[in-house]
Image (cartoon, rainbow, N blue to C red):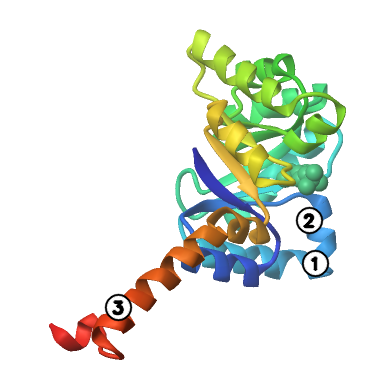
Amino acid sequence: MKFLLDTFSPEAVRNTLEYFPIEGVTTNPAIICREHAPLKPVLLELRELLAGKMLHVQTLQTTADDMIKEAIALKNLLSRTEGDFFVKLPAVKEGLKACRELKQLGVGVTMTAVFSPAQALICARAGADFVAPYVNKLDDAGDGENCVSETVKLFGIFGLKTKVLSASFRNVSQVRRIALSGSHYITLPAAFYEKLISHPMTEMAIEGFKNDWNTEYGNKLPLDML
Ligand code: E4P
């Protein structure tokens, strides 16, 4: 499973890229609004920060024709190399129509707000590069893990190339379960990456190594002794 960052904050992108193996950034209208920032300059800044990594940006349009227009404008603004831009379209009828046409035009598509394996399957057949099930929202209403594992299984049965990009997480346990379900990608907010790597036992182990070393060699570091 590969990791993406769910954000519209250039600072979060800078900080997270420095430490974590991130394949790109996803965003959505709610995340954009939370930053209270101007759209175009921040999108361009994200593009520069990410270099050739993936950037997924959602359209707010509701008809296929308008989705296509917005997707092309976004791609023209934000794509520099093959596979570095994906427009996010909602998993509805108009989104499916737009997906099929955009794929003919060579635009990458992520179908988002997916809540069932059946939705995911039809989106994949429409040519979507990614489908994004909302795990925590599904957990609230039922079972996010089941949706992801059945979707992965269906894509395998039918040999579909579409990748599952799971979104909407609240805890590390959900991440573990979704990884075991075979999700190809997940997207998480920046703070989540700290939670993934942190463990109190790791801190205790490091303290133990330091104490043993100090007892034997005092303040001398291995580097001083090489
Ligand atoms: C998808 O674009 C987002 O990752 C998703 O909406 C986040 O879901 P949340 O609002 O449950 O965090």
Q: Amino acid at mark 1?
A: Glu
Q: Position of residue 91 (x, y in %)?
A: 77, 27
Q: Position of residue 141 (x, y in %)?
A: 86, 27
Dot 1 or dot 3, earlier in sequence: 1
Query: Which residue is denoted by mark 2 in the rendering?
Result: 31
In this rendering, position of residue 12 left or right of residue 159: right
Distance (Cα) linking label 1 and label 3: 46 Å
Q: Amino acid at mark 3?
A: Trp
Residue 158 visible to an observer of this rendering: no
Query: Which residue is denoted by mark 1 in the rendering?
Result: 35
Q: Residue at x 55, y 34 (%)?
A: 179
Q: Quadrant of residue 63?
A: top right
CB within 8 Å, label 1 to label 2: yes
Q: Residue at x 68, y 15 (%)?
A: 122
Q: Nearer the viewer, mark 2 or mark 3?
A: 3
In this rendering, position of residue 156 left or right of residue 114: left
Q: Residue at x 68, y 28 (%)?
A: 99
Which element carries disc 1, helix, strand or loop? helix
Q: Quadrant of the C terminus?
A: bottom left
Is the residue at mark 2 in contact range of ligand 1, meaning its CB lies under 8 Å from it? yes
Does 197 sit above or below residue 57?
Answer: below
Query: Any mark on residue 213, and which?
Result: 3
Distance (Cα) linking label 2 and label 3: 46 Å
Disc 3 crowd rating (10 Å Cα; few below 14, some 14-19, many 20+) is some
Disc 2 crowd rating (10 Å Cα; few below 14, some 14-19, many 20+) is some
